[in-house]
């Protein structure tokens, strides 16, 4: 038993790089001319005449004649039947993924509607509370995605594009909520934990995490503006410090991914806008608890 | 010993879905506030001031104050250092892949130059011979690709796009050579075998195989025309039969992949063109082995 | 009598899904070989030779020979004459629709010119008054559209694209006028009422209503800026509150329609811009009814 | 009872032009300020503060103050809840349609694979027989489509684009099969009958019928070429006559639809190609049963 468990593990493990289910069903072809014995699926058979005419005619002595035309036809049929099965499996999988992704999208819409209330100075604990309830749904949906992907090991990156942008939106919301609660950045592993993702099996792609963080940054200038109009003159400094560090951290990265690079570039403008708001409140002396602006050391002579 | 082998297999196996090496290096973060002990890589440190200011000011009692700003900064730094490492690793991997793909591309260019001689009715065995020599290089290159990918299990599909189109060209050439030699279709597993690919570890993606076959089909009308010009009137029928069966086999598939679907659509025109050439030789009574056209009842007077 | 009314209703009702007038005129064909009796319209006759030659030749005994070639020709002719009639009817209908839509477009241009005066702080009642006069024209034009469509029941969506964008512009203007007058959102049924549309017969498509509302939102930032310039410091808050609620209401919708989704996305930027203007007047203490900014603790020295 | 049946018919009948289910659910809004009594669906309520602030402030005496802010909020909420319901209904309907269309597409693929065998001179009755079996599936699928559309009377053209191209392919196949059997054109009503479509309720759009006929025409040159190579020298004349009449019939139509016009233009090339094949067999005197070419009257002097 141990032996068989070992073997099954070995088989799975050795299929790590391209455990393409397509290929596995083609294993029957490996002993190339012994296909007749293998069980047939009931699909409409190809035309039964010789798949390729033996090239034995006088004018083409260049060609090496084929051994068994009929075996060839069987082989071709079998191969395309197998392909058909694979493509249908893959299409069915995509449909399953699509259904879950639509639910994720729907849940994030509700969460977002909730989070937008921060711009109207509604009490944050209450907002967070409601958003967290929906987050449990998200966790469930990612669990389902992981289950679906579990059926096709090694193919995470094959289907990854199907849930990518939705996941970036989710990260953005999680990170914003986390920042509202703690004033700190939600780290990658925390994001995975909140979504019930196990980085060993079905993880949160780093680039998606980073893109989500950029999306969150895009919302901060608006937040700062609305906090100031609501009388919270201390907010700009806090957000500015947070964004400054975040921006510096991103600058450490050598971004080649076009999309992420562009998103990061937009963070620069977010920071600049927040700095301008901070300047506005500072120059008007509106910051109550902050350091008062130091008296000018040098008089402007003009 | 057995135990440790088992465990290592188990680890690998459990990482099947998204064995993202990025995430694995983040494992150190899991015990969230004990990061200080872990070894540091020598990367430019982030700005050392508090990453986020504790939100303890009067006007924002909504916020939960943060415990230790310094740990937070360490955590953020560590995370982005890790990201930097991952992105650099991934970029380095891409460079390695790119270098091999350029060699593959270079070899296929030489093979193609060789194969084009069939249009000038050069002896096929000689052409095949030379092409096969180069094929050994290709096998070597794919071996290197497989080695590179072995370093990042489960990420075949992450980088797959980097060698995709070159591989489709290779398949097209292999299939054409195989058809010249045997008059039959090179099946998927044969293609893998010729490239030294092991479908269990680093396989030939089915869609790439199918696309390569479509590319081969695109070359057949030209081949038929040139063969007829060279006096081989039997070639159109053979190619027509081959393409008819191939086309029928493809029709069994439910193609949703836009690129492959388009390539397949072009096969219809290849077949139609070959049929027209066959029609030309047939109507002129040029076919040796086929049915002679019935003797004309009325003599052409012109 | 009652019976016949009932029957006529029944006939109309049963034609709900695709009451395609084209098909109805083809009913005569159903008794397939008795077409000769039906009246003929004076259209250029088809070529009179056998439309299809009876496939009775020796080499194609596969074909079922045709009975009467002449009936066939009549049938084909009749069918295409009918098609010609339908296509011409449909083209004529389109021309009629087009003429009305051009009048709608012309009226909205005049209304728009009028509404733009709000940006120059002209008295709103006067602006509204003039616009409303033109609105009566619009009502008349939509009445004509409804009459035209009444002739082809069940085909609202067939021609809907022909007045779609003009109607969205009309909704946008109506909604803006309504907001100027009442400070509230013009609801769907009110919009229909103002255009004399009866949702039971010729209604205002929901997506067109929603798109029109988005268009109105696009004009609000400019309005706010110009009102503030004119000294109306209270306007930004009002518009902000209006847009905030409108934006939240839209977020409840699961928009898949690409065009509407994009338009809605632009509403976010409208809201953000209005918030920034509100921020500007607030931080400068220009708002009369709002909270005055706290007195600066430290005097600005410059 | 009779009365109520009459009324229900009347209601349905009067909704012919745009019986938009969206609008019907908005009927509650018609008595504009009495919405409070109507039942509420349990959807997340909008923010409860006044939807629009009463515009009574000093600086904007231009605005007419609103009567009841709270009623307004209820009204807005209600309206968007209704919209949400409508959009979800419509999306669900689209999903249902999509599922059936995928089955139609799959069935036509099998039929097409079968029909292609005519190019290899397989016995036509056998080919037709098999294709007809699949046609029964198609009939079933169109029945399902009709059922789905029955739920939303008057909206045939709203969703029509979702099954349009698949239906054109179906018509093309039906018409080709019919031509193989009878040598005549499948007329519109016959096509509807074969698909179980009742033109009164869920019909075959004329333009789709015509486009399908053009598609069939596109396949005829290939058929002729292959028939001639198979020794059927009579086929070109038959097809030429058929296409000539069909082309003439189409020319009667005033086509403005861009897509159909283009497809019809391609029919000209089909006809030309068939004429060339006819010329080839004629000039070589290969036509057995046909008229021998008349002896040239005038000698070419060059």
Image (cartoon, coloured by chain):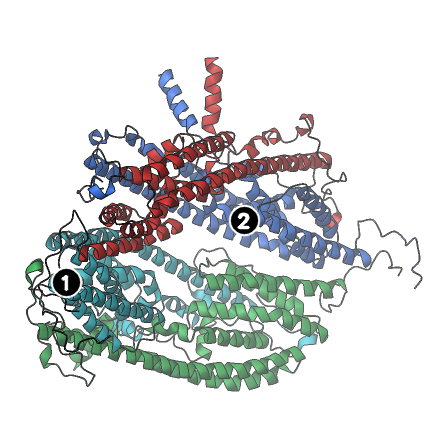
Chain colours: A blue, B red, C green, D cyan
Task: Say which residue label 2 marks.
Answer: A169
Circle 1 packing at 10 Å, graded few (<14), some (14-19), many (20+), is many
Q: Report the residue at 31% width, 30% height from top.
A: A27
- Residue A262 point in image, percent of width and height: 61, 51
Secondary structure under the numbered disc 1 in the rendered image: helix
Q: Find numbered disc 2 in the image and state the secondary structure of the residue it sits on.
A: helix
In the visual, does C290 lie left or right of A259?
Answer: right
Crowd class of label 2 (few under 14; some 14 to 19; many from 20; radius 10 Å): many
Callout 2 and callout 1 share a chain? no
Name the image quarter holding residue D251: bottom left
When the figure is inspected, residue C48 is found, relative to residue B29, above or below; the finding is below
Residue at mark 1? D235
Instruction: In the rendered view, tell whether residue C7 sits above or below residue A20.
Output: below
Q: Which of C213 and C97 is in front in this view?
A: C97
The chain ID associated with circle 1 is D
Judge depth for marks 2 and 1 and give the one in front. Answer: 1
With respect to residue C195, does C207 lie above or below? above
Name the one closer to the observer, B270 or D16. Answer: B270
Q: Is residue B255 left or right of residue B161?
A: left
């Amino acid at each position: 038993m141990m032996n068989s468990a070992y073997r099954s593990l070995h088989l799975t493990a050795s299929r790590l790089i391209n455990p393409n289910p397509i290929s596995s069903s083609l294993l029957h072809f490996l002993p190339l001319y012994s296909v007749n014995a293998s069980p047939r699926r009931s699909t409409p058979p190809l035309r039964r005449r010789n798949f390729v005419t033996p090239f034995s005619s006088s004018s083409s002595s260049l060609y090496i004649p084929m051994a068994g035309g009929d075996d060839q036809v069987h082989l071709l049929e079998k191969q395309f039947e197998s392909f058909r099965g694979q493509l249908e499996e893959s299409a069915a999988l995509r449909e399953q993924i699509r259904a879950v992704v639509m639910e994720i999208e729907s849940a994030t819409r509700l969460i977002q509607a909730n989070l937008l209330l921060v711009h109207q100075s509604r009490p944050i604990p209450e907002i967070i509370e409601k958003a967290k309830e929906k987050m449990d749904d998200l966790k469930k949906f990612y669990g389902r995605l992981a289950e679906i992907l579990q059926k096709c090991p090694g193919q995470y990156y094959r289907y990854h594009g199907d849930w990518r942008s939705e996941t970036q939106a989710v990260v953005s919301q999680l990170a914003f909520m986390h920042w509202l609660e703690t004033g700190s950045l939600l780290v990658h592993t925390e994001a995975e934990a909140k979504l019930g993702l196990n980085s060993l099996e079905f993880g949160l792609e780093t680039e998606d995490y980073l893109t989500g963080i950029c999306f969150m940054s895009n919302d901060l200038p608006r937040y700062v503006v609305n906090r100031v109009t609501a009388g919270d003159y201390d907010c700009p400094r806090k957000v500015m410090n947070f964004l400054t560090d975040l921006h510096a951290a991103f600058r450490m990265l050598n971004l080649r991914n076009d999309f992420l690079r562009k998103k990061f570039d937009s963070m620069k403008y977010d920071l600049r806008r927040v700095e301008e708001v901070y300047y506005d409140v500072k120059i008007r002396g509106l910051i109550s608890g902050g350091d008062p602006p130091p008296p000018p050391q040098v008089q402007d002579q003009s």
